[in-house]
Amino acid sequence: MSDLRDEALKSKAWPFEEARNVLKRYAKGAPKKGYVLFETGYGPSGLPHIGTFGEVARTTMIKKAFETISDIPTRLICFSDDLDGMRKVPGNVPNQDALREHLQKPLTSVPDPFGEFPSFGDHNNAMLRRFLDTFGFEYEFFSATEFYASGQFDEVLKRAVEKYDDIMAIMLKSLREERQKTYSIFLPIHPETGRVLYVPMKKVCAETYTVTFDDEDGKEWTLPVTGGNVKLQWKPDFGARWAALEVDFEMYGKDHSTNTPIYDGICRVLGHPAPEHFTYELFLDEHGQKISKSSGNGVSIDEWLTYASTESLSYFMYQKPKTAKRMHFDVIPKAVDEYHQQLRAYHDQDLKGQLNNPVWHIHGGNVPQSDMVVPFSMLLNLASASSAEDKETMWGFINKYAPDATAETHPGMDQAAGFAVRYYQDFVKPAKVFRLPTDQERAALADLAEALRSPEAALAAIAKKNDQLGKDEALPEADFSSDDFLQSVVFAVGTTHGFDPLRLWFSAIYEVLLGATQGPRFGGFIALYGVEETIALIETALKGELV
């Protein structure tokens, strides 16, 4: 443990860097509350999106890094601001007309449009928890509705009344002059309509801890700030929540970064040091637009898990959190293959390398072996070439390449085979566009098919290339099971047919044989798909039957 801690204290992996910042808060000893509190916030105004998952995944990585460098106990709270008023009806839910009459009511007072839970807030909270549970996160869930109503927030709300002028001074600096005239940190919940009211306060009384205001109809009300009668505006709520829970760390997106001084200032006014922060860049859809809960653009958690493993999504979240990422379906195959590349590398690395490897943080230091004997990108090309309808078809090819592999001994490989078929059917197949070969490509493809018919023909193709280039090289051992030998054959045919640069030859192979603009290392594809099957594929393409 000593070596691990010593190395972790020096590691440049970003979760360790953030964990060290948190540890500096308690250089003199553990906090009085007895633990370090990590928090993530969630606004359940729409269905949870993948960015919400990213916050919890990344915070969990930092929490684990902290536990590696410190013996102070930790907690992780996922806090849902479900007392927030529904400002607009999300565009990606059913029964939208029925929701409109509930605008401005707390999300936990809005009926569930799906008819599954007591409220829309409860529905979205349940979805979030289901998503997080899928990934095995260890967290405690807090509902703002329960937090306010149960009295857990009462002491901080009373303090907010006492420090009302100080908090208002912080807020007013950030508001336009017109907004300053009506702004209040308190949002009363109307006793009759149940709506969250955005109205100015006529009086904030520190003696009775009440607020007095006129509703939209001009009727005056006085309500206690405790017991769930009043909630805080979202910016003051951030800082007040930190103070109430004594939060030590929270991360949020770049769109919140300009508010950090506001959140921190309010937290300090309410008597608690501001937590450590980590600001991450936003997730974008394929068009470069910010992913939104209400519009439902980008890739959802369920959608990602339809085509790839949970670990691949965690890997995507680990990578460069301070760089904006396009979150669309095309990134999934790359994330899967890179995750397994790191997994394979991990077990041969020294401790420093392992702590800098994303998979250490994805698996909390308990890193499994990869059983992916075939890359995911290659599986997609196999599915494309064979028009696969099920993973059993895929296993027929996998077993040519790895005869000892089975679904039982390689469950990750088996899962990936099913994902590949699904991904092929939904994304690759609809986008496949085959073309006829040019005369040069036709001649080269015919020669490639001929070279693959026997070891002698393959060696002759390599010898012809050597003669053309004036090289006096010994011919390689003819092994049709070897990726490298088959790649040499493909390379030789392209060279003798004058493709310059040679990538034009490989582009032709992908476009004519696979209906794609890019593809795998073709020697590996042949070894996996089969030599005879590849010859048949070429002949079918030359007959024009793929177009």
Image: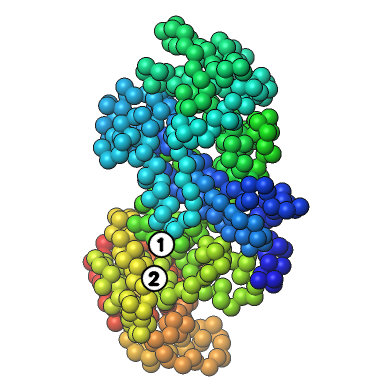
Q: Position of residue 192 (x, y in %)?
A: 37, 16
| Residue 309 numbered tag | 1
**Between 321 and 385, the one nearer to me in the picture:** 321
Q: Is residue 208 above or below residue 62?
A: above
Q: Can the viewer see residue 378?
A: no
Q: Position of residue 257 (x, y in %)?
A: 62, 37
What is the quadrant of residue 251 in the picture?
top right
Q: Can the viewer see residue 483?
A: yes
**Between 150 and 497, the one nearer to me in the picture:** 150
Q: Is residue 131 above or below residue 507?
A: above
Tag 1: residue type? Ser
Residue shown at the point (39%, 86%) measured from the top left: 481
Q: Which residue is mark 2?
A: 412
- Disc 2 is placed on an element classified as helix
Q: Are marks 1 and 2 in contact (CB under 8 Å)?
A: yes
Q: Is residue 27 left or right of residue 298?
A: right
